[in-house]
Every structure is written in structure tokens, then in C-alpha cells.
Amino acid sequence: MKANASEKSYTVKEATIKLMQFCAYRDRSQKEVQEKLREMRMIPEACEKITIQLMRENFLNEERFARSFVRGKFRIKKWGRIKIKQELKKREISTPLIKLGFTEIDPSEYYSTLNDLAEKKLPLIKEANSYKKKQKLISFLHQKGYEFPIIIEVLEEFKF
């Protein structure tokens, strides 16, 4: 009987090299590395050894991951802090590292991005009732992960 590719077994050295490539492609969280090691069916002792080596050689760095994740999701996907924080929590990033990651967002750029999103979305909302139109815009911005008080503050300058 032929073995599946997913049933391939790896030596610690082969797995380490494979994970170095995995981490070099883009920043990874420790959780992602652990999942990859589980997929490779590595024993717990090997997982620990490989993880420590990846951290020692700076292939795996949770602070760097948190910072680049925050930068990318904010600048590219235009996500707000709430959504970014939820995603980082899902990846088991600690609260202090999340706070460090948020230092990558300039407060004035945050307001500016929120304002730009609102300006672009407003004409696309097909609603005659101005109250409902405003509520739909607030809902959209909240789904993007922006904080309610900041949304209200930015929308005070809009005419509905």
C-alpha cells in the first residue's frame, strides 16, 4: 500500500529546516509553528526542541510577529484595533505583546484611515432615511474593528 504525502515522517533536522523556511516566508506566531509541527506529526520533545531553536535563531519572534501583523492588517486591510486584537488573541499572542504591536499604529493615521473608510462607504449606502444611513455606516465601521466612541467622533463632521 502506498503512503500518503501527509504521512511522511521527518527527522528533527529536516523538520527544523522546513520550519525555518516556513518562518522565513513571513512572520509566524508560535501557535502557527506548533500547528505545523502537529501536522508533521512530530513528537512533543522534538516540537519543543525545534521551537526553541527557531526562537534562538530569530526565525520565530512573537514581538516581531505582533508588530508586523498589526501593521499589515491596519495598513492593507484597514482593520481597527478591536478586530486586530481579536485576531491576535486567536493566535494566542499575549496582551503585553498586543500592546507593543499597537505602537505600530500612529493615532493620527488611525483617525485618518477611519475617516477615509467612512467617506468611501457613505455614497455606497443606498438608504433614503439619514438615521438608518448613519446606523449602517456605524455598523460597517464597527465590523471593521473600530471603537464606537472614535466612530462617533469622526462621524460628527459628516452631513447625513
Image: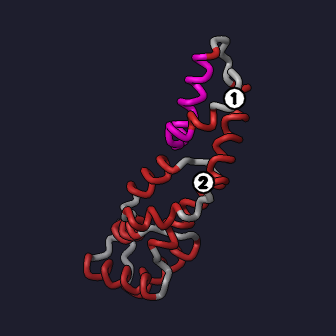
Q: Residue at x 59, y 59 (%)?
A: 105
Checking the image for residue 74, the label placed there is: 2
Q: Residue at x 67, y 12 (%)?
A: 128
Question: Which residue range is magenta in the image?
Answer: 131-150
Say left or right for 158 vs 9.
Answer: right
Which SS class for mark 1? loop
Rendered-image quadrant of the C terminus:
top right
Amino acid found under the numbered disc labelled 2? Phe
Q: Most prominent secondary structure in the magenta stretch? A: helix
Name the residue tied to disc 1: 158
Along the viewing direction, whichever of 135 and 124 lies nearer the viewer:
135
The extreme left residue here reads: 44
Residue 43 position within the rendered picture, expressed as x and y whole percent measured from the top left: 27, 76
101 vs 147: above or below: below
Along the viewing direction, whichever of 135 and 157 lies nearer the viewer:
157
Q: Residue at x 62, y 59 (%)?
A: 106
Residue 88 image-quadrant placement = bottom left
Say left or right for 32 vs 145.
Answer: left
Can residue 85 be found in the magenta stretch? no
Residue 71 image-quadrant placement = bottom right
Along the viewing direction, whichever of 39 and 86 lies nearer the viewer:
86
For the residues bearing labels 2 and 1, Cβ distance under 8 angstroms: no
Cα distance in 3D space between marks 2 and 1: 23 Å
95 vs 40: above or below: above
Rendered-image quadrant of the N terminus:
bottom left
Residue 153 position within the rendered picture, expressed as x and y whole percent measured from the top left: 59, 37
